[in-house]
Image (cartoon, grey):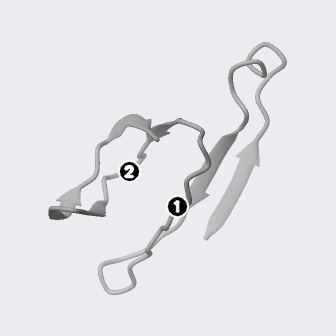
């Protein structure tokens, strides 16, 4: 698994804290469970190369391809 952050340019730094990237080659036989903690910051998310299953109050649903997460 590869996780890293990228600092925004000077021009964006007033609006963007950082860009973060999580890369991994998992399979159905070797799933990855990502857990998040509330930090009070909204996130603009882009899922590259597919979507994922998410646990929600209504069960397991497919994640969005891109959107705002908070």
Rendered location of residue 32, percent (x, y)? 44, 75
Mark 2 vs 1, N-terminal side: 1
Rendered location of residue 23, percent (x, y)? 56, 60
Local secondary structure at mark 1:
loop
Residue that protrudes farthest toward the top in the picture: 11
Local secondary structure at mark 2:
loop
Residue that protrudes farthest toward the right in the picture: 10
Q: Residue at x 69, y 20 (%)?
A: 15
Rendered location of residue 45, percent (x, y)? 46, 40
- In the rendered image, the vertical position of residue 44 relative to residue 4, given as above or below: above
- In the rendered image, the vertical position of residue 21 relative to residue 28, given as above or below: above
Front-most of residues 24 and 60:
60
Q: Which residue is mark 1?
A: 36
In the image, which disc is placed on residue 67?
Answer: none
- In the rendered image, the vertical position of residue 26 relative to residue 18, given as above or below: below
In the image, which disc is placed on residue 49?
Answer: 2
Q: Residues within 10 Å of mark 1 (few under 14, many from 20)?
A: few
Q: Quadrant of residue 10?
A: top right
Along the horizontal axis of the image, is 13 left or right of 29? right
For the image shown, how many numbered marks are present on the structure? 2
Rendered location of residue 70, percent (x, y)? 46, 41
Along the horizontal axis of the image, is 59 left or right of 10? left
Q: Residues within 10 Å of mark 2 (few under 14, many from 20)?
A: few
Q: Residue at x 36, y 77 (%)?
A: 27
Q: Quadrant of the N terminus?
A: bottom right
Residue that protrudes farthest toward the bottom in the picture: 29
Foreground mark, 2 or 1, reads 1
Front-most of residues 59 and 53:
59
Along the horizontal axis of the image, is 2 left or right of 26? right
Q: Quadrant of residue 69?
A: top left
- In the rendered image, the vertical position of residue 9 relative to residue 41, given as above or below: above
């Amino acid at each position: 698994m590869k996780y890293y952050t990228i600092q925004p340019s000077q021009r964006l730094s007033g609006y963007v804290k950082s860009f973060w990237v999580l890369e991994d080659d998992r399979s159905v036989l070797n799933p990855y469970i990502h857990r998040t903690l509330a930090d009070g910051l909204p996130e603009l998310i882009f899922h590259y190369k597919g979507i994922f299953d998410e646990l929600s109050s209504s069960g397991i649903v497919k994640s969005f391809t891109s959107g705002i997460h908070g």
